[in-house]
Every structure is written in C-alpha cells, then in structure tokens.
Image: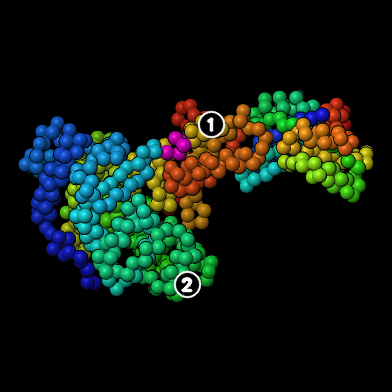
Amino acid sequence: MKITQISVFLENRKGRLYDVCSLLGANNVNIRALTIAETESFGVLRIVVDKCDAAVKLLRDSGFVANFTDVVAVEVPDTPGGLAMVLKVFADNDVNVEYMYGFVEKHSDKALLVFRFEDTDVAQQVLARHSISIVTRQEIEGL
Amino acid sequence: MEVPFWNKQVETLDRTSLQAIQLERLREMVAWALKTPLYGKRLTAAGIRGPEDVTDLHVLEQIGFTTKDDLRRSFPKGLLAVEMDEVVRVHSSSGTTGIPTVIYFTRDDLDRWTDLLARSITATGASSRDILQNMMTYGLFTGGLGLHYGAERVGMTVIPISGGNTKRQIQTMKDFQTTVLHVTPSYLLHIHSQLEAEGVRPGDLALKRAFIGAEPHSENTRRKIEDLLGIQAFNSYGLSELNGPGVAFECIHRKDMHVWEDAYLIEIIDPKTGQNVEDGQEGEVVLTNLIRRAMPILRYRTRDLAFLHPEPCACGRTHRRLSRILGRTDDMLIINGVNVFPSQIEERIMKVPEVATNYLIHVDKKGALDRLTVKVEIYPKLFLGEAAKLEALRARIREGLRSSIVISPNVELHEPGSLPVSEGKAKRVVDERPKD
C-alpha cells in the first residue's frame, strides 16, 4: 500500500521551515517522518504526516507550494543490520531507490523507513514476496 | 611636460578648419547613406538628395535621430551601403529583445578606425616601447579587436589575452612585464584583490598605465585604481554603433576624454526636446559617424548622459572633451562591462513555462565585480516535489539567459507571491551597487 508524502518548496529565506512546522503544529497535524533535500539556493521539505489531505490544503491555502508524492513506508527492527536487510532485497531484485529516509518510532522497537522508488508497484510486489511489512495509510494516521 | 601626438596636425587643427573637414566628410557620408533604404527615405524626405544639399553641419537636424530600434529593424543588411564583397569585418552587439545589431567595416573603414585608436593610445603617453595586455573580450564585441589593431599600429607589443582567468592574467603580467592594461575598471579592481591574495605587490610588476572603459565609473574609482596599483588610469569611450573604442579618449592630463571630432560629429541634446544644449550642459550624447562607409550612422542617440567641456585642454588639442558618462536615459544595465537590457531577461523568462510572470533583477557587488541575480517565482502546478528537477530548471533558465545576454547570472527560485506583482509599476530592477 502506498502512502502519501508531502513535498514543500522552501525558498532560501530565514524562518521558512519554521513557518511550515508552526502552521502544521497549530493545526494539530503531526509529522511522522521528515527530510530536507537542499541545494545552494532552495530546499524541498519532504514529510509524512498523520492528516495528509488536510495538511496539503492548509499549506496551499497559506501560500506554500506543496505537492503529493507516492512513497512506501516499511517497518524494520531497530537493530544493527535492519536497514541493510531491506536494501539487500531491493538490490537482489533490481529495485531502484530514488531516495529514502528513516525515523525511529517512540515506544517501539521498530524503525520507520520511507522509500521513493522508480517503480512503486514493482517495489511493493517485491516487498510482499519477501514478507516485509508495509505500513498502511491507516497505520500512519494512527501512529 | 612634453605632449605626445600621433597626428599633431589634425589633433591641433583650428576649429574652423576642423569644421570644414567635418562638413566635407558629412557630405561623403550622406552620399553613402543615401544608398541605404532607411536613410535614403529619411534624407530625401528632408530634401537632401545628394551631398550638395548638405550646406552646413546642422542640415541633418531635419532627419531626426537614429535609434537602436532603427538598427534592429534594419538587421541584418538594411544599413549596408556597400557590396558584401567590400566588407572585411563584422561586429555585433546583443539587442534589447533578442535581435542583435550588426556593424560592417570595409578595409578602409578599419584603417581609419585603427588610426583613431593609435591616436588615442599615443595621447596617453603610451608608445611602441610598451607591452599591452588587452583584457577586453575578443570576438564580436568591438572592445578587444578594436584596440588591438590600434596598439599594433603604434607598435606596442600586444598580448591578446582577452578577458577572464585572473590567475593567468597575473602570471602573464609577471612573465612579460606588462606595462599597459586595457580593462574594465571593475575587473581591474578584482585583479588587484587577487594580487593581494597572492602576495604580489604592485612593485613586483611593471605596470604604468591602464586604459579603462566599457562601463561607467566615478572619479573616485579611478583614483582608487591609481592609488592601489601605482599607475595612471585613462578613461575611454566608444560604442559599436560608432565603430567601438576610440570615439573619445583621455590625454596625459586625464581631465576627461577628447572626442575625435574629425571622425565623429558630436551633439549633446536635451533628451526630452531633442534640441541641442550648450557646451557645459548635461544631456544625451548623439553621434554621427564620419568615417565608416560600409555602414553610415547619422545622429545616433546613444542614451548616454554627459556634457562637453567648453574650455580647451592644456594639451593643445582642439577636439573638445566629453565628461565621463553620468547616466543613461534608458534602463540598460552594464554588468562587468557587458550591456544588458532588462527586456532581454524578461523575454527569456517568459519563455519558461515552469515559472510565473513575476521576476526581479538584482544587481550588487561581490568583491570588486558586479553580480547579477535573476529571481523568478516557480509555478505551483509544475512543482512535483523533486529537488533535482528544480535544480535542472534553474540550470536551464541560467543557460537560456546566458545565450541571450552573454553573461551567466545567478538564478534564484522563489515561492509564488514573494516577488513584486506585475501589475502597475512594479520595480523590476534593484541595483544595489554603491554609487560612490
């Protein structure tokens, strides 16, 4: 099952990341995972949140440039080699990862990994064949 | 102090004889101009059907002015007065909206232009004993090749190094013990800061003079250059429509630039009324080329603001002196010696579907050099969340701008609504360069 990541364009201006986060916080949107792709002149914030549709509406209404991207979230044991185990499956099956980022869950022994694949459908089939559990949208919302 | 001359007879000619030469050459020019569609129409409409109708130096006031737009509309051959066979050189400058302007020279035209440069160089006290490092760009731009020919005629040792590559410039100054530079003032200041960074003192070099031009600068900037490098800096003026460098040049006194009046008919006009103003009063420089047959240009509005000194120079030359350029009557920017019109930038940006119509042109200084930044807003619907795609877009915009305005600007992507809106009189250009 795919989940939705929100990408937000951040121009190189003081406090712009704070603006996004404070807006989401004030509206009770919780960030589950986060990463920033940065270049010398701008950044792209990538977040997975509990209330995705509401968050995008909120951001756009407030003048942010935001869009959706399909990603796949995987849970792995928070132990040495946990990420490597998943990556080996992808490597062995020719699944290309465009980018990924991880988050450690509180009150649990799992780590949440967010993947953006070249071909999301193929990646999901490979994950299913190897019994790697994919986090569902409902789970993200209830995390 | 002995005053050096290249052609003392012409340079010190009494004003009456000088005007007689001007009238004779103006008649010749009108005969050539009549062969071109643009001037053929304008001259005959004003009752000037041949050289004999040019009865005095003011008769051309009836044909009005020639503008950059006229040149653009005449691109590429509308102002060519000779057969292509006779043309031996083409120069070009970028146009305001993508259409360039082009200048043609016959062999004799080049010869006369070269002579003016030789005259200019000699007036500064430079001679065949000097070693010239020509840092102006070689190519379609007239600054590099124009002065090169003049320097060779004087007999200088010419190093045609062209612009850029500061490390090599400095090494070349050391290797050949360069004595004269031809350079923009901003680049010369940049070179000075590099010299300091490399621990090279002016005393380690053999520099004596710099010919500075291609961009406006203040008297303070000249003094700074002279003090920092321990040299004399000579201001110069020229534009490709009037051949290029060597329209006016400073002599050893460095008190503004002698306009070579046997080659150029200069007027200073009130830019609003188009009427001539008195010597000493500031106005727009209007020039008629008296020495180029391949492509005559009559009464060209340069858009440069300056004034003519009414009093003669101590050097004895009778050719009047033009002040340094005090400003422009249009919105042209000069970035490190390269002319850039905001309209060129706008035209390019409007061709990019991923960006909205708001943009801002920002100019400031980074060290001694000018820095041009073009800020655009991204179009929200085309943002798909990929940083790499945005980087590629930025590179594409920069490359597009570079092909149009020659220099490569910084491009910044901004969020929609963060730049001034296009309605009303939005300020599209912010120039934060110090005006000292």
What's the residue type where badge 1 is placed?
Answer: Pro
**Chain name for mark 1:** B
Name the residue tied to disc 2: B201
Q: Residues within 10 Å of mark 2 (few under 14, many from 20)?
A: few
Which residues are drawn in magenta? B344-348
Residue in the image at 52% along x and 53% along y: B366
**Chain name for mark 2:** B
Asked whether, in this view, residue B423 is left or right of residue B91, the answer is right
Front residue (pair B84, A62)? B84
Q: Do the CB atoms of the residues marked 2 and 1 lie less than 8 Å apart? A: no
Residue in the image at 64% along x and 29% along y: A63
Position in image of residue B34 (x %, y %): 15, 39
Q: Residue furthest left?
A: B52
Based on the displayed image, in which of its 4 quarters is residue B270 positioned? top left
Magenta highlight on residue B47:
no
Q: Nearer the viewer, mark 2 or mark 1?
A: 1
* Magenta portion: prevailing SS class: helix
Secondary structure of residue under mark 2: loop
In this view of the protein, can residue B119 be seen by the observer? yes
Name the residue tied to disc 1: B353
Q: Residue furthest bottom?
A: B204
Based on the displayed image, in which of its 4 quarters is residue B387 positioned? top right
